[in-house]
Amino acid sequence: MTLLIKNAKIFTKGTLINKNIFVENEKIRKITNQNLMADKVINAKNKIVLPGIIDSHVHFREPGLTGKEDFYSGSRAAASGGITTILDMPNTNPPTTTVERLKEKRRLAKKSVVNYGFHFGSTSENIEEIKNVKNVASVKIYMEKTTGDLIINDDEALKRIFSLPITKTIHAEGGQIKKALELGKDTLSRLYFCHVSSKEELNLIIENKKNNVFIEIAPHHLFLSEQDKEKQGSFAEMKPSLKVKEDQIALWEAIKNNRVDTIATDHAPHTVEEKHQINYPYGVPGCETILPLLLNAVNDGLLEIKKLVQLCCENPAKIFKLKGKGFIEEGFDADLTIIDMDLEKEVNNDSLFTKCKWSPFNGMSLKGWPVITIVNGNVVYNNGNIEHVRGKEVEYN
Ligand code: NCD
Ligand code: ZN
Ligand code: ZN
Ligand code: ZN
């Protein structure tokens, strides 16, 4: 199968240029001015082609929590949002804390329509499993109570896990961030701080930032604040919680100053019914809105396309060592997101692909949307329709 994407502006080597992309056997074969013959041609006139968006932080809820989402529904949501690769979190039921359970999750993930990889869970007892696990993006350390039971309070266990030569993805807030920085200060392996949300946390990490320390921000912290909590109640409650305007400004400032490494959704769907309970769970879906929100910000002059690609494509690929991902270059995987910067639409709960069928951004009008998503050279999303293709598990450099 060959594919030619022509007449587009493509984002390659740090800039937008007019070239065609020729895809063969799932890879970008040629970036060219030529009109090569292909089995399929996409005329992308007036559109931009970006490297496929990589979402390093999603909860697709399999196994055990499939009333909220599963790999099929979640990956369809991802594809429609321009995401071509997701990294799934381990707080499922049972949690992904043994090699055996990871094997089962791998089997479940085969129905994903986008590419996928896994973060492995940690407990105070599973250090041998962590040592034995292969081909995962990171080990996730929950230092705070959140959805699921994966929290480690035992300092000795934390010390042992932090000393392992593996990338650590960390859920910490407030004082726990300080502790994580302390625990990780002598390690050479990577420390990736998830969903950093406040000015204080941000400054603390930035002060201690070395080249193995990374900061992730979630879109809801960039585009929503405490006031939205008053309006939306539990539907705007997640961990960490929404903050005040001052914090939001600090996050944008940090993006501008190149202090932030990635933006990832923390796609954490819960059903409407669950959100209406008194003890509602924390988390909001995000795969379908991350890119339109950011493209709208580009249209508003808040963000450059180049920065968006760094945060959502290049850096996730580098940090998690994803082979062949993150760049439009010859030899790389043909994971591509075609966007229309002029398309203006409202986020609409009824047209979402996520199983939970709601978004904290419902009703928001955004300009700049993905229109075609290509995974391994196959069109998976095309203007509202999802094709039945299968993603693959990522490989690591
Ligand atoms: C996440 C979930 O529901 O799995 N919830 C959330 O509010 N972010 C867990 C997490 O990422 O902490
Ligand atoms: Zn978290
Ligand atoms: Zn999360
Ligand atoms: Zn309600």
Image (spheres, grey):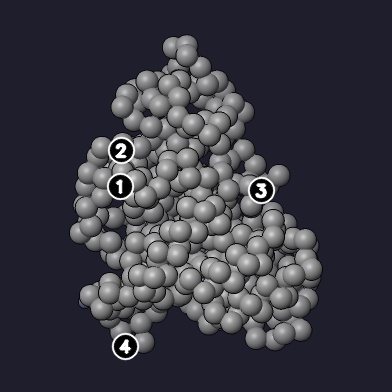
Spatial distance from mark 3 to mark 4, Cα to Cα? 41 Å
Q: Amino acid at mark 4?
A: Ile
Q: What residue is at 39 percent from the left and 79 percent from the top?
A: 281
At x 78%, y 66%, the residue is 187
The three-letter code of the residue at mark 2 reads Met
Mark 3 crowd level (few <14, some 14–19, many ≥20, 10 Å Cα)? some
Which of marks 3 and 2 precedes in the sequence? 3
Question: Which numbered circle lies on residue 341?
Answer: 2
> Label for residue 300?
1
- Eyeballing the image, is 385 above or below 162? above
Q: Determine crowd level at label 2: few under 14, some 14-19, many 20+ residues with C-alpha closer than 10 A.
A: some
Q: Point out the frontmost of discs 1 and 3.
A: 1
Label of residue 278 in the image = 4
Q: Earlier in the sequence, mark 4 or mark 1?
A: 4
Q: Amino acid at mark 3?
A: Lys
Question: Disc 4 vs disc 1: which is toward the camera?
Answer: 1
How far apart are labels 2 and 1 at the CA level? Answer: 11 Å
Left or right of 181? Residue 144 is left
